[in-house]
Image (cartoon, rainbow, N blue to C red):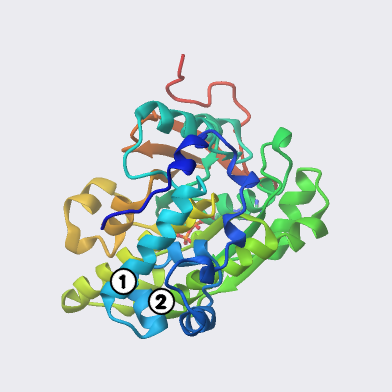
């Protein structure tokens, strides 16, 4: 679809400008050409208040919200994206490699609270990306999520982003007392940390999708920099059993994952998802009918970290990253959530 561009925006374009300085989150949808009061009301009723909220939605969701055909919804979606490009929130369709490089240098990172995992992730969990931790039960995925809830709230000098958290809990495994324990072990005030976490319990896959749909308002009000979905696939796995329902499950999960990617990019926050898999990752990826949704997540996540148990320790491996070296790091589970092992030689293959 063609884009109308205003020259003045091109002149003032500065790709390295920090996104926080911009105010696209305040641009109401009726400032878009072609959005009248009736459309605005319908969008607002569906929780879509700003241009960012609109850009995050898929055209079919927009069509549902305003009761229009898909063409009208695509038009609105494109207008929202164009507006965000003008405001430098989103990249234009064609950008130079050096501009992308500049933008990537502006990406924020959240420390995992361990040196080893931070090294593995080239500095921590990135904003504007979806990072997936996958592995078998008890491998430490939920512990990683709990630790990140504490870390992201710290100031930048201490590895955080002074940001809040939305924790979408699909397995009923979020434990505030574990947060308190981790905060205390790390010398932080537990009450303040608890106040910085909004927990949304998702009772089924539709509810999980609904929660994500309503995230926009929370992000704005609350200053959210991290969204956790623990686990992203459990409900889909439980609800869509058998081969007959596989394609519907994959479609729904695919839609959910893409919405997460848009959320991360548009609101400039980090998304972390977990995914439980059986112990052999090779078999798992080799056979898509066994993947129970896993390969959809795999293809959509920006970064994938495979975690497994080895005795008392845990091993994390960066998988298929476009730029991280493929290597493994050790971590342990203790009162600080996740932690570096005591021994010196904890990283298997050190980067030079
Ligand atoms: N306070 C604690 N101190 C030390 N280890 C703990 C503590 N709490 C939990 N653990 C460890 O965390 C493990 C569970 O890890 P976690 O819940 O993160 O697994 P998971 O990968 O999320 O599993 P699942 O796929 O079943 O959700 C327990 O087996 C235990 O060893
Ligand atoms: Mg878990």
Q: Quadrant of residue 195?
A: bottom right
Dividing the image into 4 quarters, which one contains the N terminus? bottom left
Q: Is mark 1 within 8 Å of ligand 1?
A: no
Viewer-closest of 154 and 64: 64
63 left or right of 263 in image: left
Q: Residue at x 40, y 82 (%)?
A: 66
Horizontal relation, residue 163 to residue 141: left or right:
right
Q: In this rendering, is residue 343 above or below 90?
A: above
Q: Residue at the location (26% across, 77% down)? A: 241
* Mark 2, secondary structure of its residue: helix
Q: Is residue 210 visible?
A: yes
Q: Which residue is mark 2?
A: 205
Q: Are marks 1 and 2 in contact (CB under 8 Å)?
A: yes
Residue 344's spot in the image, x, y percent? 59, 21
| In the foreground, 91 or 293 | 91
Look at 68% across and 51% down and name the residue there: 163
Report the side of 318 relative to 200 (left or right): left
Side of 191 where 273 appears, left or right: left
Cα–Cα gap, marks 1 and 2: 9 Å
Residue extending furthest front?
A: 7
Query: Callout 1 environment at 10 Å: few (<14), some (14 to 19), or many (20+)?
Result: some
Splitting the image into 4 quarters, where does residue 325 fall? top left
Q: Is residue 246 above or below residue 159?
A: below
The verdict on label 2 being within 8 Å of ligand 1 is: no
Q: Position of residue 131 (x, y in %)?
A: 45, 48
Q: Earlier in the sequence, mark 1 or mark 2?
A: 2
| Residue 166 figure quarter | bottom right
Element marked by disc 1: helix
Residue 252 marker: 1
Residue 160's x, y, as percent?
67, 42
């Amino acid at each position: 679809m063609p884009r109308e561009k205003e020259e003045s925006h091109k002149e003032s374009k500065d790709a390295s400008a920090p996104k926080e300085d911009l105010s696209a989150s305040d641009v109401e949808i009726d400032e878009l050409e072609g959005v009248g009061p009736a459309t605005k009301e319908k969008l607002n009723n569906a929780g879509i208040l700003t241009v960012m909220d609109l850009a995050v939605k898929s055209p079919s969701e927009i069509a549902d919200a305003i009761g229009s055909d898909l063409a009208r919804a695509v038009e609105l979606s494109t207008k929202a994206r164009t507006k965000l490009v003008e405001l430098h929130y989103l990249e234009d369709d064609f950008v130079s490699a050096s501009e992308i490089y500049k933008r990537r240098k502006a990406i924020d990172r959240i420390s995992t609270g361990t040196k080893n995992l931070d090294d593995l992730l080239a500095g921590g969990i990135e904003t504007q990306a979806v990072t997936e931790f996958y592995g078998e039960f008890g491998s430490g995925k939920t512990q990683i999520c709990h630790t990140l809830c504490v870390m992201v709230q710290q100031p930048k000098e201490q590895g955080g982003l002074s940001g809040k958290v939305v924790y979408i809990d699909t397995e009923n495994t979020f434990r505030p007392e574990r947060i308190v324990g981790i905060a205390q072990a790390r010398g932080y005030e537990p009450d303040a940390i608890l106040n910085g976490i909004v927990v949304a319990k998702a009772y089924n896959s539709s509810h999980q999708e609904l929660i994500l749909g309503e995230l926009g308002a929370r992000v704005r009000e609350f200053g959210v920099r991290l969204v956790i979905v623990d686990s992203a696939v459990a409900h889909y796995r439980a609800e869509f059993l058998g081969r007959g329902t596989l394609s519907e499950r994959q479609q729904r999960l695919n839609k959910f994952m893409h919405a997460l990617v848009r959320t991360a990019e548009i609101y400039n926050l980090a998304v972390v998802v977990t995914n439980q898999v059986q112990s052999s990752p090779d078999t798992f990826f080799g056979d898509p009918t066994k993947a129970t949704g896993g390969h959809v997540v795999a293809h959509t996540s920006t970064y994938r970290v495979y975690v497994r148990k080895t005795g008392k320790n845990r091993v994390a491996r960066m998988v298929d990253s476009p730029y991280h070296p493929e290597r493994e790091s050790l971590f342990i589970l203790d009162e600080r959530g996740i932690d570096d092992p005591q021994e010196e030689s904890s990283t298997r293959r050190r980067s030079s």
